[in-house]
Amino acid sequence: MAEAAADILVRVLRAWDVQLVFGLPGDGINGVMEALRKREEEIRFVQVTPPGSACSIAFGLGISPMAPGSLQALQVVVADIEQAHTDLTARGVDVSPIDDQPWGRFVRFADPDGNSWTVQQPPVRSG
């Protein structure tokens, strides 16, 4: 049986000494995440799939030349900022108070590497 593309990708990631992958996968990356899961003793990863997500974000050694902590103001959009704030706080994240602006409601935090994140609830538009 031929090797699946996802398995080839994981083999290459191992050759590059990738040890950690974190993603927010949509349907298109599920095969890759399953291939990573099969080799979880060799590559550590965290997978989070928000309901309705069709995008992915991945972090790991060898994936990008960016230094840890160099990604600033990565923005994600949520439907309920209070729920996001409560969830982040419950998980021990040092998250800002909710910032209400005419263009949306926001909370901000930094991940353990020092990358900064902005979580936005867009304003309700009338009409």
Image (cartoon, rainbow, N blue to C red):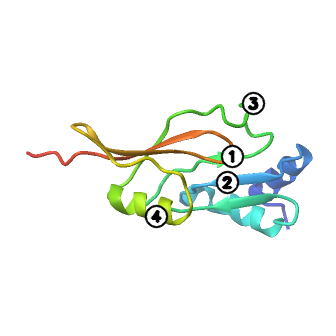
Residue 8's x, y, as percent? 82, 53
Tag 3: Cα neighbours inside 10 Å, few (<14), some, or many (≥20)? Answer: few
Where disc 4 sits, the SS reads helix
How far apart marks 3 and 2 lie (CA) works out to 16 Å
Q: Marks 4 and 3: which is nearer the front? A: 4
Other residues around mark 2 within 10 Å, as few (<14) / some (14–19) / many (≥20): some
State whether residue 26 appears in this view.
Answer: yes
Going 61% across and 47% down the picture, which residue do you hit? Answer: 111
The residue to which callout 2 is attached is 22
Give the SS element for disc 3: loop
Name the side, left or right, on which 112 lies relative to 99.
right
Tag 1 residue = 59
Among all residues in the image, which is located at the extreme left? 127
Q: Residue at x 83, y 61 (%)?
A: 3
According to the image, label 3 marks what residue? 65
Residue 113, disc: none
Please say whether residue 50 is visible from this viewpoint.
no
Instruction: Give the distance between the C-alpha atoms of the residues marked 3 and 1, in whole angstroms.
Output: 11 Å
Q: Where residue 102 appears, x then y in whole percent?
A: 21, 37
> Real-space Cα distance between discs 4 and 3?
31 Å
Quarter of the rendering containing residue 63: top right
